[in-house]
Image (cartoon, rainbow, N blue to C red):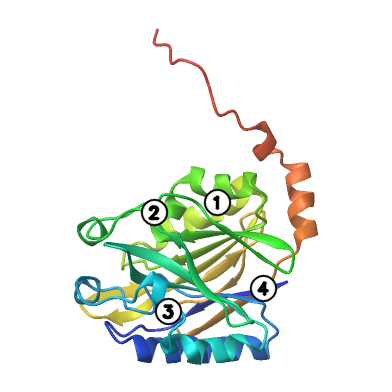
Amino acid sequence: MRVAAGQAVSVSGDLDANVRTAARLTRLAATQDVRVLVLPEAFLTGYDVAAFDGPLPDAEGLDGGWLDPLRAESAAGVTVVVGTALRRGAERRLSQIVVRPDGRADAPYDKQHLDGLEKTFFTVGDHGTSIEVDGLELGLSICYDGCFPEHAQAAARDGAVGYLSSAAYFPGGAHRRDLYYAARAVENGMYVVFSGLTGRCGGFEFIGGSAVYDPEGRPIARLAEEEGLAIADLDAGLVAQTRATHTMISDHRGDLGPRVRR
């Protein structure tokens, strides 16, 4: 199955412009036979204080026409996973919207680990989520989630062969970014599709770095800070082979007993 991590500039607070950009990247992905496209964190609203503090789309309002340009391009056969800030009841969440080729759109996952200023605006999600595309299970993740090994491990233990991360890294974070997502891949013998926001959004700068990592943690497709797609083929057979050779998932001990000091 062909997957892609897309990156582009997001405009703070401009849903229509950002949906059009997402649709354009989806159209490009479809021409290259991509089946799953991952786009960055808070891409549809913009990752910016003004956007976070302003009006947000509602999780119950995804059937409205504002997503139609993205639905139209997804219909070519691309499942799109894209980050947004949204309202869920009385709460604000950082979420991933999933748009499917049959026109369905939902927001099945809310970020479970909030970082820095996000804690001022948002409530943490209360469950992990995987989606199924072409018979393959793929775990969902938003940025800081991927810094915690247990998050990706939970997806892998549940059967995921890929881990889809919508993210936004600031200048100075490239070293940590590249370590985290390669580690999540090699620890769990699965693919990681990392999509990073790039360029200026409101008052912030972002550094892109979108990539696909194979089950050994090697980057097999990568972008710098340019707009584009990092495309690779996900091979479930290679995941099974890697996990049979490196048995970290099955060998993992959830309880190491009490700590002893001498």
Q: Is residue 44 above or below residue 242?
A: below
Amino acid type, mark 1:
Arg
Q: Is residue 7 above or below residue 151?
A: below
Mark 2 and 3 residues: CB-CB less than 8 Å, in contact?
no
Q: CA distance from mark 1 to mark 4?
A: 17 Å
Q: Considering only order in the chain, which callout, 1 or 3, is on the residue closer to the N terminus?
A: 1
- From the top left corner, tell me how far across and down residue 119 is, in percent: 24, 55
Q: Which residue is mark 2?
A: 125
- From the top left corner, tell me how far across and down residue 100 is, in percent: 60, 77
Amino acid type, mark 2:
Gly
Q: Considering only order in the chain, which callout, 2 or 1, is on the residue closer to the N terminus?
A: 2
Q: Which residue lies most toward the top here?
A: 262
**Secondary structure found at label 3:** loop
Q: Which residue is mark 1?
A: 184
Residue 98 seen: no
Of the pair 57 and 194, the residue shown nearer to us: 57
| Number of numbered markers | 4
> Which mark, residue 232?
4
Name the side, left or right, on which 85 lies relative to 140: left
**Secondary structure found at label 1:** helix
Q: Considering only order in the chain, which callout, 4 or 1, is on the residue closer to the N terminus?
A: 1
Q: Which residue is mark 3?
A: 225
Residue at x 47% of width, y 81% of height: 63
Viewport quadrant of the C terminus:
top left
Residue at x 59% of width, y 67% of height: 212
Viewport quadrant of the N terminus:
bottom right
Amino acid type, mark 3:
Glu
